[in-house]
């Protein structure tokens, strides 16, 4: 059994599903820390990016994004070669997530918004592709619907309309993450069967 510090299953094998779930949970906790430190971000109409510009919140915000980016990259290196679309998507998503921290909205707002929009489009396209080709269940259709509607809300509120940009971003990312975990879990179960 290799000792890598990564989540493993009961046989000691690396488990991409657990790795992704760990990354998402860790990022959620770190973002919750940012929200606890500066709760005004919930109504500031700057989305999650609000927390990337203040000295008190930039640390947990950056750690959350870098953790999530690293987990997507690690998972992309651990899924089978037959998952080229998933692997490529995760490898493109990882640096985009990190770039959201490196290009804060306060310095390069348009670039930051473009990076985030591209990330959402890749995530929605990947979700649609996976559901259409591998996991067409009513649960997956519900998750895609949630992604689509919350993505539309995020796009609307991104244009500086007063509203719920942060909340729509969180709902989108939550639905995307659950869909990816479902897919990886179901795929692993089929491989072990």
Image: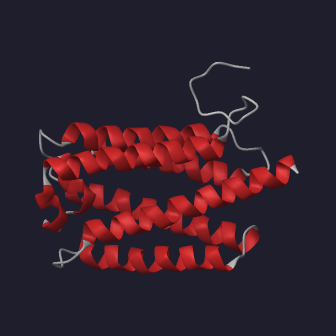
Name the side, left or right, on which 55 lies relative to 170.
left
Name the side, left or right, on which 143 lies relative to 150.
right
x and y, in percent, of residue 107 in the image: 16, 49
Q: Please tell me how many numbered marks the rendered image carries.
A: 0
- Quadrant in the picture for the N terminus: top right
Q: Is residue 79 above or below residue 178?
A: above
- Farthest residue in the front direction? 10
- Farthest residue in the right direction? 193
x and y, in percent, of residue 13 in the image: 73, 31
x and y, in percent, of residue 105 in the image: 20, 54
- Going 75% across and 70% down the picture, which residue do you hit? 133
Q: Is residue 104 above or below residue 182?
A: above
Q: Inspect this view and state whether residue 104 appears.
A: no
- Going 48% across and 77% down the picture, which residue do you hit? 146
Name the side, left or right, on which 45 lies relative to 31.
left
- Going 32% across and 49% down the picture, which residue do you hit? 100
x and y, in percent, of residue 179 in the image: 58, 64
- Going 43% across and 62% down the picture, which residue do you hit? 173
Colouring rule applied to residues = secondary structure
Q: Inspect this view and state whether residue 187 appears.
A: yes
- Residue in the foreground of this view, choosing between 159 and 190: 190
Name the side, left or right, on which 39 lies relative to 172.
left
Quarter of the image for residue 6 reads top right
């Amino acid at each position: 059994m290799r000792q890598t510090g990564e989540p493993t299953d009961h046989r000691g094998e690396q488990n991409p599903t657990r790795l992704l779930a760990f990354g998402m949970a860790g990022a959620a906790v770190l973002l919750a820390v940012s929200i606890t430190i500066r709760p005004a971000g919930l109504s500031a109409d700057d989305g999650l990016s609000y927390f990337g510009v203040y000295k008190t919140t930039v640390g947990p915000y950056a750690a959350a994004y870098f953790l999530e980016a690293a987990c997507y990259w690690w998972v992309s290196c651990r899924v089978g070669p037959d998952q080229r679309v998933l692997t490529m998507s995760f490898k493109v998503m990882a640096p985009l997530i990190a770039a959201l921290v490196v290009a804060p909205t306060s310095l390069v707002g348009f670039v930051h918004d473009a990076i985030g929009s591209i990330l959402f489009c890749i995530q929605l396209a990947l979700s649609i592709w996976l559901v259409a080709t591998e996991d067409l269940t009513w649960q997956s259709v519900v998750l895609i619907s949630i992604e689509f509607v919350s993505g539309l809300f995020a796009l609307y509120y991104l244009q500086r309309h007063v509203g719920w940009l942060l909340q729509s971003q969180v709902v989108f990312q939550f639905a995307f993450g659950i869909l990816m975990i479902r897919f990886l879990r179901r795929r692993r179960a089929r491989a072990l069967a």
